[in-house]
Image (cartoon, rainbow, N blue to C red):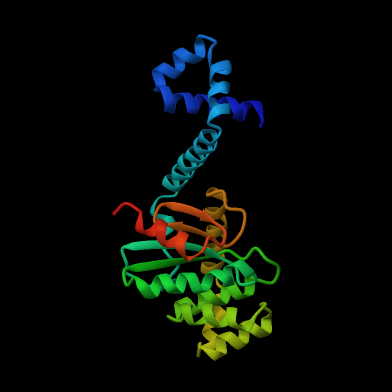
Amino acid sequence: MEPALRNTLLTALLALVFGFLGAATWSYSGLADNRTRAFLLEKPEILKEVAEALARQESQERLSSLGDDLYTPFPGAVIGNPEGSKVLVEFTDYNCPYCQASLADVQQLVDEDPDLKVVMREWPIFEGSEGAARMALAAGLQGKYREFHEKIFELGPTSPATVETAARAIGLDMEQARADAASEAVSVELVRNLTFAQSLGFSGTPAFIAVDTPLAGAVGYDRLKEALDNAPS
């Protein structure tokens, strides 16, 4: 472990165990290193818990800095109840196998909870994904986001041909869809989603915000449901 990180964790641990004032006194007395090290050798799991607590605190600070914009969807880019009060944000890519694996988990959550709104954030980070992401947002503008979302995953790896096939299969107005997919509004949305993901420290898809809990990766139905159920009302 890097010395700086070790010192930060030791200080945080002392603050949690002895109280902030006691931790400061303990540290300045020169006793922190030896006694805390001995304490951690007896209970090493505490250091992991402190690291996780610090990571959660940092995530909460990042979320707070983004405000309501993160939870405000691009028009139509919603699965579930558009007026739902319980919100799950998903960052997705159509060439990501883990996003495809998470599709059933999200659909089950939506089917079980009529108050759940899933805000979809198109984040095309895999090669060849941008065209599908653009068409998905164009489908949202025609009220058919979910239909396109499911169809393009069903057709497999994206290409101009599969994007066109998916769009036609769900009955999009193709002339309007092509214009919307190439629009400045869609380009701005993709940049916004990239900025959101980077600000939250996400490095890949899928990634979720379950009300106020960031979750990276295909964490599965149980973890998503737990985070949604335990979120403050």
Image location (x, y in percent) of residue 225: 41, 62
Location of residue 146 in the rendering, given as x and y in whole percent from the top left corner:
47, 78
**x%, y% of residue 99?**
58, 68
Q: Is residue 120 above or below residue 138?
A: above
Q: Name the image quarter holding residue 87.
A: bottom left
Q: Is residue 76 visible?
A: no
Q: Nearer the viewer, residue 125 or 105?
A: 105
Q: In the image as oriented, which residue stretches furthest toward the left?
A: 233
Q: Residue 120, how many percent across, how many down?
A: 48, 67
At horizontal 46% and vertical 81% (from top left) the residue drawn is: 144
Q: Does residue 115 show up?
A: yes
| Quadrant of the snapshot with the N terminus | top right
Task: Say whether residue 152 is left or right of residue 74.
Answer: right
Q: Is residue 180 above or below residue 175?
A: above
As drawn, 59 above or below 175:
above
Q: Of 93 and 114, which appears nearest the observer?
A: 114
The single residue placed furthest to the top in the displayed view is 29
- Which residue is at a point 54% across and 48% down the rendered structure image? 199
Number of labelled discs? 0
Q: Nearer the viewer, residue 205 or 21?
A: 21
For the C terminus, the image quarter is bottom left
Q: Residue furthest right?
A: 127
Looking at the image, which residue is at 32% across and 67% down?
Answer: 84
